Amino acid sequence: MAPGGSAIGGQPEWRDDAEYPTCPVCRKLMPCIAQIALGDPWGDDLDGWFTFFLHTECSLAAMVCQG
Ligand SMILES: [Zn+2]
């Protein structure tokens, strides 16, 4: 994952404290699958991220927005 950019896989970046959602079915932490940077894609301003999680065992997805 490029610093400050969007990416599939890898370790997410966090503006605030890390927020890994807990699966509501089995209570395990949900793994991150992708992160989309918010802001002007051609500029240097970064307003935050949408971070997406997928727990395949329970077929549940989640999203966290920081920014
Ligand atoms: Zn689960």
Image (spheres, helix red, strand yellow):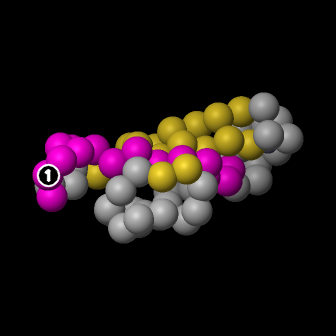
Identify the secondary structure beneath mark 1.
loop
Give the residue type at disc 1: Gly
Q: Which residue is painted at 55% across and 50% down in the image?
A: 8
24 displayed left or right of 3:
right
Depth check: 22 or 65 in front? Answer: 65
Quadrant of the image where one finds ligand 1? top right
Which residue in the protein does label 1 denote? 43
Left or right of residue 41: residue 60: right
Where residue 53 sits, quadrant-wise, is top right
Q: Residue at x 14, y 52 (%)?
A: 43
Q: Is residue 4 visible?
A: yes
The residue lying furthest to the front in this view is 42
> Could you say which quadrant of the image residue 55 lies in?
top right
**Relative depth, front residue between 4 and 15:** 4
Residue 20: x, y in percent?
Answer: 57, 55
Q: Percent from the top left, x then y, of residue 52? A: 54, 43
Mark 1, Cα crowd under 10 Å, few <14 / some 14-19 / many 20+, is: few
Q: Which residues are magenta?
A: 30-44
Ligand 1 within 8 Å of the CB at mark 1: no
Question: Does any portion of residue 66 appear in the rendered image?
Answer: no
